[in-house]
Image: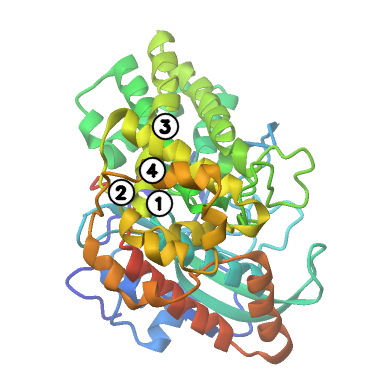
Amino acid sequence: MPTSFRYSPDPQFQALGPEFADPVAPARFPAEILRFRNQRAAAGVGLEDFTAAEWASAFARFEPLPGNQSEPLAMRYHGHQFRSYNPQLGDGRGFLFAQLREAKSERLLDLGTKGSGRTPYSRFGDGRLTLKGGVREVLASEMLEALGVPTSRSFALFETGESLERSDEPSPTRSAVLTRLSHSHIRFGTFQRHAHLQRPDLLQRLIDHVVEVYYPDLAPLEGDERTAGLLGAVVERAAELTARWMAAGFVHGVLNTDNMNITGESFDYGPYRFLPYSDPTFTAAYFDQTGLYSFGRQPEAVFWNLQQLAVALAQTACEQEPLAEALHGFGAAYRRALTGAVLARLGLKSQGGTQDETLLAAVLQAIAEGGQALRWEPFFFDWFGGSMSEQRALGGARGPLYQGEAGKAFRQALGGYEPETPGRLTHPYFARTEPEELLYDEIETIWALIAEHDDWSLFEAKLERINEARSAWGLQAAVRTA
């Protein structure tokens, strides 16, 4: 396989040993039809020169990459699902395929799969992914990356030629296998598994691995200080991730502890939604009857998950107070991160202190004042650049929605704020009347054309427009170099 000089294999996870994963064989599929190839991400890890046949060999048949893992590993973990503990979890339709270093940052990245076949943790599942699910995940990860949210990146999507039966979509439906690129697939639930089995020795091994691989600045610490330091670092990243979700108007839908990882990236997009308008009670999953993971409750849900991680880590700590102190840093970290995320979405330089807090409150009140007539994403599109966009915003179709008391207070709060990069407003994207969104109805329209006519034109055009928005916003999720 023709890898470039940027390809740097580094299979670290397998060194943890057999208590952390099971070797598995990938499924063999009747078809290998390429539907998405992330050439930009491939270039970042030295795999951009693969031919079509080599791409299929690697990401439809999962033949080992040079110098990498010799076999796929289904990772072991437990987790709380809707706050009920489930010890029957683990990679049930995916595995860790390879690990490699990102060229620019030298971060260790995982190539993980979804829909690649049955494993010891499949239970009653078939280990497969629907093509619709794959399409939805590609769209989600591309949109979130454009909006500056730390996210896994969809790397490859193949249609696999099988007919699947599902209770939550018309069946039989088409099948797919997805490969995603992520900073880590080590979950909160990975720690919970070993705590549940009362194996503090394995917990300590996992803590040491995570520190050495992902948080090397904590490596000089030992014992309780190392454990508390790790929790504090994960708290900071989880707070940042949550704030970015909120600023993007994103509802994950299934914030279980097995769906949160230790490097602060979101991944595994099932019944997600983007907000159509400001509504704290908005839920993404039809089965979330109590609104546990509604938009407005996402910070609470993430904090609860962090508490469960702290409980697991406590098995290795003699002193509990440092863990509690690290955990309680979430609130302040989240507020700081949310202020920063909203300023980034508006493209504005921070003024610091109470002035930024006043602007944040004004933003949220102005969006809420617009009610259902003011969609979430258009607000940030209209006001990108702050006061420099006032004429554009007030002169557009949504101009009357900004004339209320909250709208006036927001415009007043903008006084004194300067654009981070004024030249961005000259991007052709901001000459449009409407921004790029990813609402439920549009996804359904894209899928209907694929399902009924095998027409991928809307899907491909959507990806091009999301890429244009990414270029215009210039938003970057924080890149950690570990």
Tag 2–tag 4 contact (CB < 8 Å): no
Q: Secondary structure at mark 1?
A: loop
Please report whichever mark, 1 or 2, sits nearer to the chain's N-terminal start. Answer: 1
Q: Quadrant of residue 321?
A: top left
Q: Is residue 418 above or below residue 203?
A: below
Q: Which mark is residue 478?
A: 2
Q: Which numbered mark, 4 or 3, is in the foreground of this view?
A: 4
Please report whichever mark, 2 or 4, sits nearer to the chain's N-terminal start. Answer: 4
In the picture of the structure, the residue carrying the numbered disc 1 is: 150
Q: Amino acid at mark 4?
A: Gln
Q: Which numbered mark, 2 or 3, is in the foreground of this view?
A: 3
Please report whichever mark, 1 or 4, sits nearer to the chain's N-terminal start. Answer: 1
Q: Which mark is residue 412?
A: 4
Q: Secondary structure at mark 3?
A: helix
Whether residue 60 is visible, yes or no, is yes
In the picture of the structure, the residue carrying the numbered disc 3 is: 335
- Residue beneath the point at 30% across and 68% down: 425
Please report whichever mark, 2 or 3, sits nearer to the chain's N-terminal start. Answer: 3
Q: Quadrant of residue 410?
A: top left
Q: Where residue 438 sits in the image (x, y, percent)?
A: 56, 66
Please report whichever mark, 3 or 1, sits nearer to the chain's N-terminal start. Answer: 1
Tag 1–tag 2 contact (CB < 8 Å): yes
Q: Amino acid at mark 1?
A: Pro
Q: Where residue 156 sits in the image (x, y, percent)?
A: 46, 73
Residue 284 shown left or right of residue 6 in the figure: right
Q: Secondary structure at mark 2?
A: loop
Q: Amino acid at mark 2?
A: Ala
Mark 4 nearby-residue class (10 Å; few <14, some 14–19, many ≥20): few
Q: Which numbered mark, 3 or 1, is in the foreground of this view?
A: 3
Whether residue 206 is visible, yes or no, is no
Q: Which numbered mark, 1 or 4, is in the foreground of this view?
A: 4
Mark 3 nearby-residue class (10 Å; few <14, some 14–19, many ≥20): some
